[in-house]
Amino acid sequence: MSKTLTGACLCGAITYEITHTEGDVADICHCAECRRASGAASLPWVQVPPGRFRVTRGAARGYASSPHATRWFCGNCGTPLYMTDNTGRSVGITLGSLDQPEAVRPNVHGWMSEHVSWAAVEDLPRYDKAPPYDF
Ligand SMILES: [Zn+2]
Ligand SMILES: [Zn+2]
């Protein structure tokens, strides 16, 4: 089963669409970079192959947050929207920017080694570092 999901930034200048299939890795990331980028204790993502993601309006600004990855956000309102990796293996989309944020349920915690102790952690499998993104 796959379904098309749409998303947008806060100001609406950028919209996108993904095809989500059951079994996609949806990770709540506790890494320090996601914390800074979002201003929140953790950031939930869903990972899809690049072919299942497309921007449908506007253009996001990119920031190379590491030698391997670029974070894309709205240059007007600042919403973190998606992240690409240099190998083109997957695109991570922020669950909070989906029009229906409950359409994808997180199924794993990543980067627990950098978790902030006061933030509650739902009972899901946990990884010290990046969870496997297996499609
Ligand atoms: Zn915006
Ligand atoms: Zn992260």
Image (tube, helix red, strand yellow):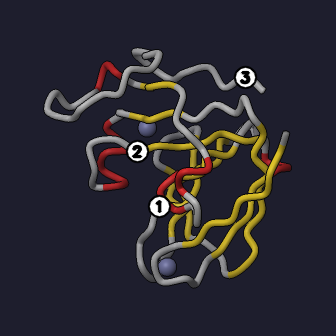
Relative to 38, 53 lies left or right: right
Among the two numbered marks 2 and 3 on one chain, the one whose residue lies closer to the N terminus: 2
User: Cβ–Cβ below 8 Å for labels 1 and 3?
Assistant: no
The amino acid pointed to by label 2 is: Leu
Q: CA distance from mark 1 to mark 2?
A: 10 Å
Q: Is residue 98 above or below residue 94?
A: below
Q: Nearer the viewer, mark 1 or mark 2?
A: 2
The amino acid pointed to by label 3 is: Asp
User: Cβ–Cβ below 8 Å for labels 1 and 2?
Assistant: yes
> Looking at the image, which residue is at 61% across and 50% down?
103
Name, please, the residue furthest toward the left.
118
The amino acid pointed to by label 1 is: Pro
**Residue underneath mark 1:** 80
**Residue underneath mark 3:** 134
Quadrant that contains the C terminus? top right
How busy is the neighbourhood of tag 1: few (under 14 within 10 Å), some, or many (20 plus)?
many
**Residue underneath mark 2:** 43
Relative to 122, 98 lies left or right: right
Q: CA distance from mark 2 to mark 3?
A: 20 Å
* Image position, residue 124 (x, y; %): 44, 20
Ligand 2 quadrant in view? top left
* Image position, residue 99 (x, y; %): 58, 66
At mark 3, the secondary structure is loop
Among the two numbered marks 1 and 2 on one chain, the one whose residue lies closer to the N terminus: 2
